[in-house]
Image: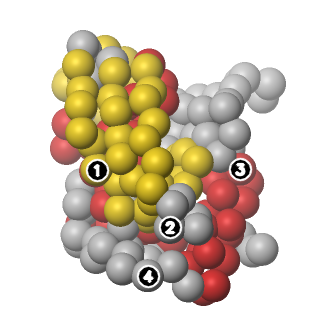
Amino acid sequence: MAIRNLRFEGDPILNKPCREIKEMTPRLQELARDMIETMYDANGVGLAGPQVGVLRRIAVIDVGEGPYVFVNPRIVEMSGEQVGEEGCLSVPGKSGVVRRPDYVKTEAFDIDMKPFTVEGHGLFARAMCHEFDHLDGHLYVEKVEGELHDVQYEDDEEEGEEA
Ligand code: ZN
């Protein structure tokens, strides 16, 4: 496993739509494992392919329930609403208020290309929306209500809100 280099806002790769993964390969499985390691290393709760320079429909998320790998994810149901602060590992040191559904149900494939369905509330639902937006070339900053602002993390505060 290896830590991958993160791409940051302004890099055009972050605005490009990703291609579907038709077949799982050892190389893509290694990518998924590297993405998980890179996410943990950066204290994030999620990471999507374009953020490590790969335009494929793959994202990883861990909001404290263990890591999920999402291949070709598709949101099939959403409801409710939450309004809260969001950040992104590709937009370091910034945060902004984004409105998201409070409940999301997603169908995807895992690292072995087995289909699965997962439901998430709260932060998990927010993380899924955020990561899957990356796969369509969108950053949360497009959806921020009001101004983006600088964030200062306390040393011992959870930094786990960036994705
Ligand atoms: Zn992000």
The residue identified by callout 1 is 74
Report the residue at 67% width, 69% height from top: 34
Examine the rendered structure and indicate whether residue 155 appears above or below residue 2: above
Report the residue at 24% width, 62% height from top: 137
Regarding mark 4 in the picture, which secondary structure is present there?
loop
Labels 2 and 4: the sequence-earlier one: 4
Alpha-carbon neighbours of circle 2 within 10 Å: few (<14), some, or many (≥20)? some
What amino acid type is highlighted by mark number 2? Met
Label 1 to label 3: alpha-carbon separation: 24 Å
Q: Quadrant of residue 120?
A: top left
Report the residue at 62% width, 75% height from top: 29
What amino acid type is highlighted by mark number 3? Tyr
Labels 1 and 4: the sequence-earlier one: 4
Labels 4 and 3: the sequence-earlier one: 4
Near-viewer residue (49 or 74): 74
Q: Are marks 2 and 4 in contact (CB under 8 Å)?
A: yes
What amino acid type is highlighted by mark number 1? Arg
Examine the rendered structure and indicate whether residue 57 appears above or below residue 92: below
The residue identified by callout 3 is 40
Label 3 to label 2: alpha-carbon separation: 23 Å
Q: Position of residue 33 (x, y in %)?
A: 68, 66
Q: Is mark 1 within 8 Å of ligand 1?
A: no
Report the residue at 65% width, 46% height from top: 67
